Structures are given as structure tokens and as C-alpha cells.
Image (cartoon, helix red, strand yellow):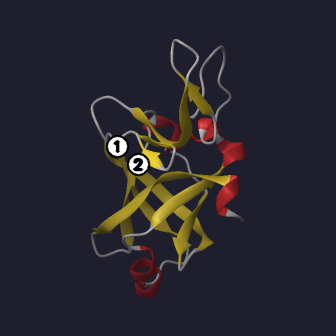
Amino acid sequence: MRKEDCYLLGKITRRHGLAGNVILKLDTDQPELYNKLESIFVEINGLLVPFFIAKTTRSKTDALNILFKNSTEALVDQSLGKNVYLPLSTLPKLSGKQFYYHEVIGFTVFDQENNNCGIIESVNDQTAQNYFVTNFGGKKL
């Protein structure tokens, strides 16, 4: 699986208990869509490695408690602090003028007078108001 064919679901933040469970902090505004995951891709050394899931339960509103199939201490250690991805094909279809942030990367932004304001490089969703990060003449805006 290539990273370009996936979207970031979240990050494995820590262990939970002694049975080999981990906590997956979800980076989504619809965490209920991910209650019944069968597998995830964990980024290890730049590669997406499939991890198969035996059981998931809700930890908090934005986190899952995950037990991997055939979980071992080494498997858990390998996944800690790593980003988690799912294939783009698993995203729910949107209607109307809705879009996913990854879909607008590379789009050109124009102001009300039709002046070019740069190309969208990323979307910052870590603040109270989400915003596009654009590159205009070598400067990030």
C-alpha cells in the first residue's frame, strides 16, 4: 500500500493495560465511523505495514482502544508513536459541495478580485478555525 493511496486516521499514542492493547488517537470529526476496524496501516520507517485488529473499544470520544491479532510485546513496541492510515477507498462518499481536505492539496486559491493567492500545500486543522497553508512566490501564507 502506498501512502498516496491512504489518508491519515490518527496516531498510536500509548499502551493500555497489560494485554497488549494500544490507544489510537483519531484525527477525525466523525470518530463513530471507525468503531469496527478490521485492519490499519501503521507507518514504520516510511513504509505502511498492515496490522490486523482482534478487538476495538471506545476509549474516549476521539480515541480507540485496540488489540492487535497475534499481539506481542514487540508488535506493540513497534507501533507506539506511529501514524496510522487507511485506504482512501474506505472514506464515506460526500454529497453536494462537501470535500475532504486531502482533495484540495494542489488547488490554486484566488481572492475576490481573481488575483492568484498561491497553491494549497496543506490544511491546518489543529486550530479553532481550520485554514489552508498556501505557497505564494516561495512564501507560505
Q: Residue at x 61, y 32 (%)?
A: 108
Q: Residues within 10 Å of mark 1 (few under 14, many from 20)?
A: some
Kindly identify which residue carries mark 1.
Answer: 62
Give the SS element for disc 1: loop
Q: Which residue is drawn at 27% across and 31% down?
A: 128
Q: Nearer the viewer, residue 48 or 35?
A: 48
**Amino acid type indicated by mark 1:** Asp
For residue 127, what is the image quadrant? top left
Give the SS element for disc 2: strand
Earlier residue among tags 1 and 2: 2
Number of on-image labels: 2
Contact, CB < 8 Å: mark 1 with mark 2?
Answer: yes
Against 125, residue 63 (above or below) is below
Q: Is 16 situated left or right of 3 in this image?
A: left
Against 82, residue 30 (above or below) is above
For residue 52, what is the image quadrant? bottom right
Kindly identify which residue carries mark 2.
Answer: 26
Q: Tell me the CA gap for discs 1 and 2.
A: 5 Å
Q: Nearer the viewer, residue 116 or 53?
A: 116
The C terminus: image quadrant: top left
